Image: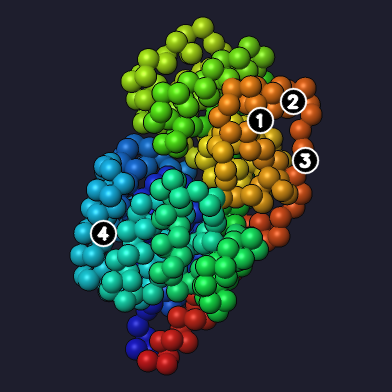
Amino acid sequence: MGNKKIRIANIVGTRPNYIKIAPLFKKMKCINKFEPLLIHTGQHYDAEMSGIFFKDLELHTPDIYLGIGSGTQAGQTAKVMIALEEVFIHKRPDLVLVVGDVNSTLASAIVSAKLHIPLAHVEAGLRSFDRIMPEEINRIVTDTLSDYLFTTCIDANRNLYKEGIPKSKVFFVGNIMIDTLMLFKQKAANLNVAECKFTLRPQQYALLTLHRPENVDGNLSLEKILRALETISKNISIIFPAHPRTRKQIELFGLKKYFSNSNIRLVEPLGYLEFFNLMLNAKFVLTDSGGIQEETTVLGIPCLTLRRNTERPITITRGTNTLVGIESDRIIQEARRIIRGRYKKGKAIELWDGKTSERIVKILYERLTSSKKAK
């Protein structure tokens, strides 16, 4: 076993996964003892957008692409499980590493456990305490099955301990998203997306993302949000790179009227660097994304989260994030406060320092090489 490399299967399925895996995969490639594999389930199946993200993040082409595509929660998870079982049996990884809380994460965790392959979960312990969210189910099950639980904050550690996870499995390492943010901040800052694409100058616009099922799958919830945005856009332009599914729901519910006479720019999805540049120069961000709550906190950009709860409360208690729900009046009120220059300033968060990937790889190296020797 002495010269045999440790094979680590790194699983990605969606664009946020690429952002989280990029710094980790690069660090693993620098360890001679490791043989990292990049496996893309294809949960986000837009080949062009995936290609842009891989290029922006300087990730090489996946070693294995499963091409799963869309489906129901259960259907998509099942298809990933079936495909991954075959891959794991053939490739025999020594460790499976998953990030975040998407269906590909859950599927990987279940298959790993069934095949008795050790599992590492990056971003473990995050909880919204809302089991209506499919992501919450994915997080809980993945954490239960994991052997290495890498957390972003002490709150996540506490959540895991309350659920009975042994402390020996839990490692507070910081936020992997911030590693990528720091790696590419200068490259993104050198772009001029707002002016070149939208003839807008810095601070003259707000940036919006909207994709969660609880927000876009219901006519009432989506219209409440769009009604607020229409009002806000009378005071500031809003750039809205729309997820394909969100755009489909807008058309399905007959809500395109909110864009015809407003200052909301409904545009195609953007690559990582272009979106990052828009975020850097935005007056504020409106979002239902978890990762953007963290990124805006580190960048010191006001963020309004269009959700009733968040699994990242530290972005509220120490960051620039405000939870506003989906009621029109509250969204408008908080947006106007920011436009008038009244918004909270964030504070530094422990270990959100761009070195999380180093800490994770160091722990894995020490634990996995010692276990190999023991065999």
Circle 4 crowding by C-alpha within 10 Å: few under 14, some 14–19, many from 20: many
* Nearer to me, 34 or 293: 293
Residue that label 4 marks: 81
Residue 301 falls left or right of residue 145 = right
Q: Which mark is residue 345?
A: 3
Q: Position of residue 370 (x, y in %)?
A: 47, 87
Q: Which residue is mark 1?
A: 284
Marks 3,1: beta carbons within 8 A: no
Disc with the residue nearer the chain's start (3 vs 1): 1
**Cα distance in 3D space between marks 1 and 2:** 11 Å
Q: Residue at x 72, y 48 (%)?
A: 317
Q: Which residue is mark 2?
A: 337
Q: CA distance from mark 4 to mark 1?
A: 39 Å
Q: Check if mark 3's residue and mark 2's residue have beta carbons within 8 Å.
A: no
Which residue occupies 42% across, 91% down?
Answer: 373
Q: Residues within 10 Å of mark 2 (few under 14, many from 20)?
A: few
| Label 1 Cα crowd, 10 Å radius (few <14 / some 14-19 / many 20+) | many
Q: Amino acid at mark 3?
A: Lys
Q: Nearer the viewer, residue 141 or 124?
A: 141
